[in-house]
Image (cartoon, rainbow, N blue to C red):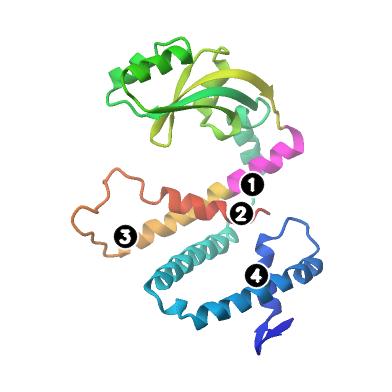
Amino acid sequence: MAQVDGQAITTQALDAELADAPPGVDRLAYRKAILPQLVDRTLLVQAALKMGIDKTPEFAAQRERQEQRLLVEMLAQKLANTVPVPNVQAVDAYIAAHPYEFAQRQKFYVDQIRFAQPASTEALLALGQFKTLDALADELTRNATPFTRDHVLVDSAFLPAAIAAQVARQPSGDPILLPYQGSYTANAIIQRMAAPVTGEPARALAAEILRRKAIADALGQTLKAQRQKASISYETGFKPDAKAAADGKTVSDAADRVPAR
């Protein structure tokens, strides 16, 4: 496709860039559009090599990290080819079991306070007694507890089913405490917006969700088998908690990066 100081930019290299292309894009037009970018990148790589950047420990560490991520992503894509298409019964059952992702989906504009998880269950329950966010904020201030406050959009489709149902039932203005990534949030609903997903769009979405769950399951089984065969040791102080879900994020991230059908 092009030559830069004798170094070829091949069709295969251009095709690799198609992974970042929008769905349904004209492949030939996209190749032509990105070819100048690959030429520029090749020139900058040449400059980096002349500076010896590829010989630095920092480059070696980053290259290993990127290679590992790429191998895991390609493993996920290979396993995805073995995952069967969800049948009609499975799709219908998923839609029925997750109403707040589909027919009863809502978006909530909320006034939200975010704070660190309290030291005890009693302290958390005490915060749950406040009837307004202003009163809760005053209490956090009195206790010198750091917090942030902002207006955010919450989508019931991305909440666990039980929490989505709880939020949907919550009266507007009344704070509801929810866990969030190791911390807690207090949320008061300002506005509710119905956002139902029904019919064929719902079925397509449910099928893709089930497909990704199956990919994650296949990755999880592969990881489990590898872990059972491997000899793993940790330096003092670095051994993870036995209760920690070691494979959760690595597996889910790789499954999420598999292209949609």
Callout 4–callout 3 Cβ contact below 8 Å: no
The part of the chain drawn in magenta is: 198-211
| Amino acid bearing label 4 | Ala
User: Residue at 27% of width from left, 50% of height from top?
Assistant: 240
Image depth: mark 3 or mark 1 in front: 1
In-front residue for pair 52/255: 52
Query: Closer to the camera: disc 2 or disc 1?
Result: 1
Residue drawn at point x = 47 percent, y = 14 percent = 134
For marks 4 and 1, give the one nearer the viewer. Answer: 4
| Residue that label 4 marks | 16
Residue 22, percent from left and from top: 73, 56
Viewer-closest of 225 and 260: 260
Which structural element holds mark 3? Answer: helix
Q: 10 Å neighbourhood of mark 2: few (<14), some, or many (≥20)?
A: few
**Mark linked to residue 31:** none
Residue labelled with disc 1: 208
Q: Is residue 205 magenta?
A: yes
Report, in whole angstroms, how far the alpha carbon at label 4 lies from the one at label 3: 34 Å
Counting from the top left corner in percent of width and height, residue 30 is at 77, 66
- Identity of the residue drawn at 24% across and 54% down: 238
Identify the secondary structure beneath mark 1: helix
Badge 3 crowding class, 10 Å Cα cut-off, few under 14, some 14 to 19, many 20 or more, is: few
The CA distance from mark 2 to mark 4 is: 26 Å
**Which mark is on residue 84?**
2
- Relative horizontal placement of residue 233, taking residue 60 as reference (left or right): left
SS state under label 4: helix
